[in-house]
């Protein structure tokens, strides 16, 4: 017997479908196509320019208009001057903040904190909806394993389990309304799918993905977003195995609609339907329109081909009216379920208090910082023992750069830079000597090197703020050489010569290849692009008011040539070990053409990352002990319980992100050497212990195997409770048939 709640939701669902059916019955073809048509309009007369199209029902969605008065004027026309009064979807890339900017998604991922990520999305939703925006093109949940790809910045990293947990949290944060529906921001899972596997890490490039890799690695975060209730998906630009995602019946129909039962709306990426011709999948826009509509793209983002060609495709019966009604129904369903049809969308919610948003993104920035190196516990600093600090580098005082990519609406005036935060914190206590030394991170001008050297020489220590400006990552901004740009590394080496401790704070939108410079720092903090309050978060961490807890959501290569490099790699038939690796510098002169190593490594880079996925240090230390597993044999359908005791063995409180990994030793397909299957953030006072408990159901060990079926397979498993994807406490179990 269904509960009253089920009956109510069933009733609501029937009501939605009834409303859709009633509208479809009275809409003309042009009005139906209008719901599939997303336009952008720039310039001073947006409302005037779009008024006729909106009034005649030929526009269903607008992108990149953020003026609340213009948005309200357009909504008023749509509701009160068009035949059916259907409100507009107002879309904007609110990726990691609107006016108040949280850390990059990649930085948020380093917090491993779904609750915090959800709250950051919620603040974004409250700020954006206060301007009339009701649809964001986020979360971006492409798995990114090649940091040359500029869009790794907006991803949630390399791992499907972590990206799934955090992507789902963003969906809930955007869409979950705190007070009625006015501050609901419709979310969009993008880019569906496989975009992060673009060859050579070059944006928009060809993507060849084996089906099991697509299903076991790239699709899971999208399935999690679907299960979290995401209302829309966006197709990827990618040409996947010869079929662009925007025309992929496999992705848009077989997986999304048939397997996952998705009934929301799919939007193309920018002009991507027309680009099917550029890909060479078809000869003209009519064919592109047909292929996209047939595959299941509901909304055409700004190419205009749906408006121009769907009417003739329906008139010539190439596209059945039923298919058009399905596409339009998906869009109407999103608008109805988001409440747009049942409230006055021109009544905008109050903009949230700026200070509360800034406090949240400050906490997010603090939790995003990853301490990679801290020789001789040089950090945290003690202001009472310092007279003078040399603050060096082009990113110490750049309020816009620290916001990172995809911050169209970010307000730099809300930013507090590291230099400003240090001045505020140390005013009257410690002298700060700021030497920018380089105009930009790309600069090759060494003329200020000596000034930086002199500043360090007369200070107690030097703190570098270096890395990449926001423009060096994000869409279309891939780099082949992902070392520190310009002569920043040389600047560090030069200043190192002053003989004072050197601390590095790296602001960047990707993991940089720092194998040749990392050891020049006594301490190294990775700050990503930390958002509006990155400065105070960094200052708090440098001086111990915050204890770093971040863990890497991506592997860090030693050099660019190592990528792609990721922890969940396959064993191969010749796995490398420390014993088999031979370094290029160690090959004796005149060496015979003999077999070197004969395992999978690079002569000049070995096979290990500089810093592994899941790695991050603290100002305290944690001991892992007393691992237990409740059984070593578990039947399919059963579960094992793995526990361990984590103790804070240092003299400061700290937060540890304890990770659970498994390895399926043998499978119908080769399996990764490790896979993340759980994590828990625990805060421990000095000397305090906590017993973590992970329950692992055999269903969580399922994968798409050789026969294409999704199932867990009997066999032996390793399991670790660990501080990163390397090491940890180990035991094993077997799934029995
Ligand atoms: C861009 C991006 C996509 C974004 C869209 C709208 O090309 O690929 O992520 O949401 O266009 O700006």
Image: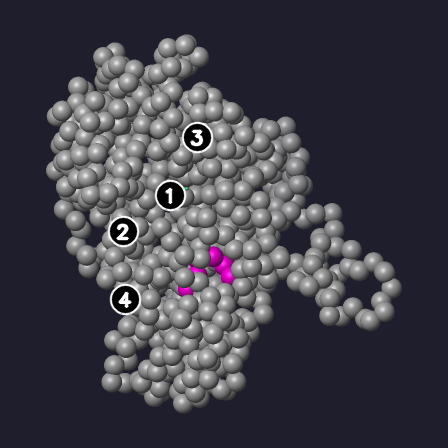
Reading the image, the residue beneath label 4 is 416
**Whole-number angstrom distance, CA of label 2 to CA of label 3:** 28 Å
Q: CA distance from mark 4 to mark 1?
A: 26 Å
Give the structural element (helix, strand or loop) at label 1: loop
> In this orientation, does residue 553 appear?
yes
The residue lying furthest to the right in this view is 592
Residue 675 position within the rendered picture, expressed as x and y whole percent measured from the top left: 55, 47
Q: Quadrant of ligand 1?
A: top left
Vertical comparison of 555 with 29: above or below: below
Q: Earlier in the sequence, mark 4 or mark 1?
A: 1
Residue at horizontal 54 percent and vertical 63 percent from the top: 483
Residue of label 3: 274
| Residue 568 appearing in the image | no
Q: Residue at x 50, y 87 (%)?
A: 499
Determine which residue is flagged by label 1.
Answer: 139
Quarter the N terminus occupies: top left
């Amino acid at each position: 017997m269904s509960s009253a709640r089920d009956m109510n939701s069933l009733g609501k669902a029937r009501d939605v479908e009834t409303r859709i059916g009633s509208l479809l019955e009275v809409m003309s073809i042009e009005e139906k196509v209008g719901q599939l048509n997303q336009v952008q309009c720039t310039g001073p007369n947006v409302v005037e320019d779009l008024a006729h199209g909106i009034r005649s029902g030929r526009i269903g969605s607008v992108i990149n208009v953020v003026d609340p008065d213009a948005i309200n004027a357009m909504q008023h026309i749509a509701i009160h001057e068009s035949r059916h009064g259907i409100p507009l979807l107002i879309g904007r890339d609110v990726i990691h903040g609107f006016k108040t900017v949280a850390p990059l998604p990649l930085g948020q991922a380093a917090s491993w904190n779904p609750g915090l990520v959800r709250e950051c999305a919620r603040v974004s939703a409250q700020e954006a909806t206060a301007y009339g925006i009701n649809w964001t093109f986020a979360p971006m949940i492409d798995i990114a394993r090649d940091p040359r790809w500029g869009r790794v910045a907006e991803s949630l990293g390399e791992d499907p389990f972590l990206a799934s947990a955090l992507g789902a949290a963003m969906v809930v944060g955007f869409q979950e309304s705190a007070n009625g529906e006015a501050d609901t921001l419709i979310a969009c899972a993008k880019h569906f799918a496989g975009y992060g596997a673009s060859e050579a890490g070059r944006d928009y490039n060809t993507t060849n993905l084996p089906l099991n890799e697509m299903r076991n690695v790239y699709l899971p975060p999208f399935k999690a977003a679907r299960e979290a209730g995401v209302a829309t998906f966006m197709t990827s630009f990618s040409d996947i195995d010869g079929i662009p995602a925007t025309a992929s019946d496999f992705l848009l129909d077989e997986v999304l609609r048939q397997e996952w039962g998705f009934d929301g709306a799919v939007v193309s990426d920018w002009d991507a339907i027309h680009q099917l011709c550029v890909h060479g999948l078809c000869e003209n826009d009519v064919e592109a329109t047909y292929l996209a509509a047939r595959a299941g793209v509901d909304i055409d983002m700004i190419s205009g081909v749906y408006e121009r060609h769907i009417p003739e495709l329906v008139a010539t019966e190439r596209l059945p009216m039923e298919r058009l009604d399905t596409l339009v129904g998906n869009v109407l369903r999103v608008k109805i379920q988001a409440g747009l049809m049942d409230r006055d969308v021109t009544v905008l919610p109050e903009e949230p208090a700026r200070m509360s948003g800034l406090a949240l993104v400050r906490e997010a920035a603090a939790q995003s910082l990853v301490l990679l190196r801290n020789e001789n516990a040089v950090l945290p600093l003690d202001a009472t023992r310092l007279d003078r600090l040399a603050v060096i580098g082009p990113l110490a005082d750049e309020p816009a750069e620290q916001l990172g990519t995809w911050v169209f609406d970010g307000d730099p005036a809300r930013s507090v830079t590291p230099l400003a935060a240090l001045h505020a914190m140390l005013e009257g206590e410690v002298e700060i000597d700021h030497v920018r030394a380089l105009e930009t991170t790309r600069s090759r001008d060494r003329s200020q090197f000596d000034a930086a050297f002199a500043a360090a020489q007369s200070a107690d220590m030097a703190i570098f703020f270096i890395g990449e400006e926001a423009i060096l990552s994000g869409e279309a901004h891939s780099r082949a050489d992902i070392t520190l740009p310009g002569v920043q590394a040389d600047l560090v080496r030069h200043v190192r010569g002053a003989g004072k401790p050197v601390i590095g704070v790296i602001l960047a939108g990707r993991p940089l290849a720092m194998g040749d410079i990392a050891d020049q720092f006594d301490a190294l903090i990775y700050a990503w692009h930390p958002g509006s309050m990155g400065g105070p978060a960094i200052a708090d961490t440098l001086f111990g008011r915050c204890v770093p807890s971040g863990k890497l959501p991506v592997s860090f290569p030693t050099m660019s040539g190592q990528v792609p490099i990721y922890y969940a790699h396959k064993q191969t038939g010749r796995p490398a070990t420390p014993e088999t690796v031979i370094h290029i510098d160690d090959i004796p002169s005149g060496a015979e053409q003999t077999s070197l190593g004969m395992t999978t490594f690079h002569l000049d880079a070995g096979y290990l990352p500089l810093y592994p996925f899941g790695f991050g240090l603290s100002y305290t230390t944690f001991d892992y002990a007393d691992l237990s597993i409740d059984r070593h044999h578990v039947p399919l359908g059963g579960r094992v319980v793995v526990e361990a005791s984590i103790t804070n063995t240092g003299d400061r409180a700290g937060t540890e992100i304890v990770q659970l990994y498994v390895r399926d030793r043998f499978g119908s397909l080769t399996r990764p050497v490790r896979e993340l299957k759980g994590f828990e953030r625990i805060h421990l006072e000095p000397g305090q212990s906590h017993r973590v408990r992970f329950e692992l159901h055999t269903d969580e060990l399922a994968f798409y195997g050789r026969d294409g079926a999704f199932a867990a397979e009997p066999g032996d498993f390793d399991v670790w409770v660990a501080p990163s994807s390397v090491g940890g406490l180990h035991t094993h179990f077997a799934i029995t048939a």
